[in-house]
Amino acid sequence: MTNRTAIVTGAAQGIGEAAARRLVREGVTRLLLIDWQDESLRLVAESLTNENVQADTLCIDLRNAEAVCDEVARAADALGGVDALINAAGTTERGGLLDTDPTAFDRIFGLNVRAPFFLMQVVAPRMRKGGVIVNICSMLAYGGPPFLLAYSASKAALVALTKGAANTLKRDGLHVFGINLGWTWTPSEQEVQTKVHGLADDWYETFGARQPFGRLLFPEDPAGLIAFLTSSDAAMMTGAIIDLDQYVAGTVEDNPGA
């Protein structure tokens, strides 16, 4: 990725921030960082600029499709060509079959499905040949707990969208991938688990110790996979949905007590 350009959404914290920092380590020198958290986004951009990287910011609500189509298009044009688009912005808003109202449903699908759709629509024509799009999906695309039904459905839709986009763009020399992310600690997940579910501040250590590999994922884990997918090592791949998890979808664990 030496001397390349990347657009990263959700870049103010968590997976988006980690992805931006990893791409800089891989040689990216021009970034467009997108998020709705203005101050946090500015601080990330400033820290990256100190590493001799030009990091521009765009503070918008990605649920606003008109803003995506207008403002992102203008900002992408200013980059003079795009090599990578990382769609890391998303919401894990809770909502089940019986308690999700239409407004909440639209919020979830607006950020998790509609935003990446129109970001790809806007950015793909501005990408150089060999460009890569990575969408952050979820293991819950296979199915999840009842209180995350709307979220699970949105991530399943994003998986289908990712494969469809890969098929659409393959003859243009563009690559599109999805990462089905397992349980990952992020600042927003920390807030949800402590404030919504009432867990202790060290919940991630307690629950992490029970995982097969002894910890939860951290933002640097998907960032590492993003580094591979945007590298020349993945040049002959597209449309892959990669499970980044400690569990194997579709299997069950042994129960010695059965």
Image (spheres, grey):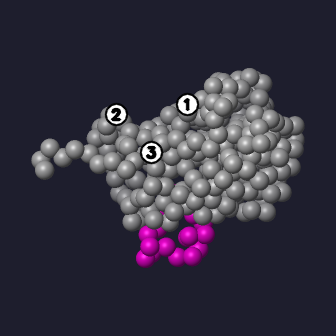
Q: Nearer the viewer, residue 252 or 205?
A: 252
Query: Which residue was labeled with disc 3?
Result: 182
Query: Which residue was labeled with disc 2?
Result: 213
Q: Is residue 187 above or below residue 128?
A: below
Dot 3 lies on which element?
A: loop
Image disc number at residue 165: none
Amino acid type at mark 3: Gly
Assess whether mark 2 and mark 1 are in contact (beta carbons under 8 angstroms).
no
> Callout 3: 10 Å neighbours few (<14), some, many (20+)?
some
Tell me if 118 is positioned left or right of 198 in this view. right
Dot 2 lies on which element?
A: loop
Residue found at x 63% / y 35%: 237
Q: Could you tell me how many numbered marks the image carries?
A: 3
* Magenta segment boundaries in residue numbering: 92-108
Displayed quadrant of residue 253: top left
Distance between the alpha carbons at the discs numbered 2 and 3: 12 Å
Q: Residue 181 at what x, y percent from top left?
A: 49, 45
Distance between the alpha carbons at the discs numbered 1 and 3: 14 Å
Residue found at x 38% / y 43%: 248
Is 103 magenta? The answer is: yes
**Considering only order in the chain, which callout, 3 or 1, is on the residue closer to the N terminus?**
3
Quadrant location of the N terminus in the rendered image = top right
Residue found at x 67% / y 61%: 114
